[in-house]
Image (tube, grey):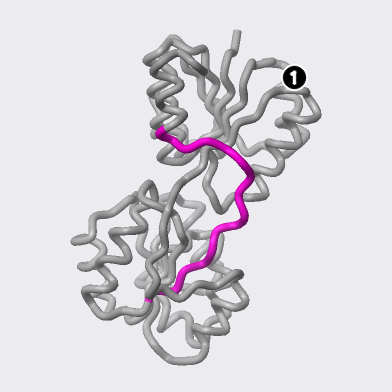
Amino acid sequence: MTEIVLFGGTTEGRTLALLLQKKQYETLVCVASDYGESLLKPGPCLRVHAQPLNEDAMCRLLQETRPRLVLDATHPYADGVSKSIRTACQKTDLPYLRVLRQTATPADCLLFDDLPALIAFLNESEKVIFSTLGAKEAVALSAVHHAADRVWIRVLPRCESLEACANAGFPPSHIICMQGPFSADLNRALFAETNAQILVTKETGAAGGFPEKVAAARELGMEVAVLRRPAETAGVTMAELTRRIEEDLL
């Protein structure tokens, strides 16, 4: 029996998995990789499915498990994945709930609606760039003038991430593989060590270490260029969902 199917792979997903297991909800957590699976601890009430799923595969999984609720705690920038989960829930007639990640972007950050606009800005100067956009954006960042010399890119410590950056033309010396989120002190040390002048990041909120990145960049007098989030659907905050789980109102 599966009560809850949780699409995770994020800080919120791991936190929810622990809460659901503590309250003994029969839960299946779906993550896209073995690395995501390694960050979870299966238990009597918690199973993990570690494999990328397209919309058809999601439909098959939901038809087989027939949970009473599907929780979407995927990354706020993974809008394509969230859309597939919503559609799969509609096709299988299952209730869907999106977990919203709250954030507030400081007024002095430079905001960009898409990657082409961001890349165009980065090509207006020859400043050194520190990117925390992730490995999926490595190809886009390779369009920055003299990217191999100007861009430092921090990604998750996965073989796939390192390979994506290398294939995009970034030398090993400019690829930093680390698991976040990071403290302001560690961010500041990395930014200073690379002589970065522009921080390129996503609006990932507290769960993604966004405030610490911005604080460190400010201390060093760096510009902060932020790729805006995709528009979110309706949902609930982590605080509200945590309350519901702890009070057995899920």
- Specify start and end residues of the magenta stretch as a single range: 224-239
* Residue drawn at point x = 37 percent, y = 67 percent: 106
Q: Is residue 203 magenta?
A: no
Q: Name the kind of residue labelled 1 in the image.
A: Gln
* Residue drawn at point x = 59 percent, y = 71 percent: 115
In the rendered image, the residue lying farthest to the bottom is 125
- Using a 10 Å C-alpha cutoff, classify the residue at mark 1 as few (fewer than 14 neighbours), some (14 to 19) or many (20 or more): some
| Whether residue 197 can be seen here | yes
The quadrant in which the N terminus is found is top right
* Residue drawn at point x = 34 percent, y = 49 percent: 179
Determine whether, in the image, residue 101 is placed left or right of residue 59: left
Which is nearer the eye, 103 or 143?
103
Residue where numbered disc 1 is placed: 63
Residue 70: quadrant of the picture:
top right
Determine whether, in the image, residue 220 is placed left or right of residue 18: left
Q: Residue 122: x, y in percent?
A: 49, 83
| Whether residue 38 can be seen here | no
Q: Residue 46: x, y in percent?
A: 47, 17
* Residue drawn at point x = 55 percent, y = 28 percent: 6
Q: Is residue 235 magenta?
A: yes
Determine whether, in the image, residue 194 is placed left or right of residue 72: left
Q: Residue 40: x, y in percent?
A: 40, 29
Q: Residue 167: x, y in percent?
A: 55, 67
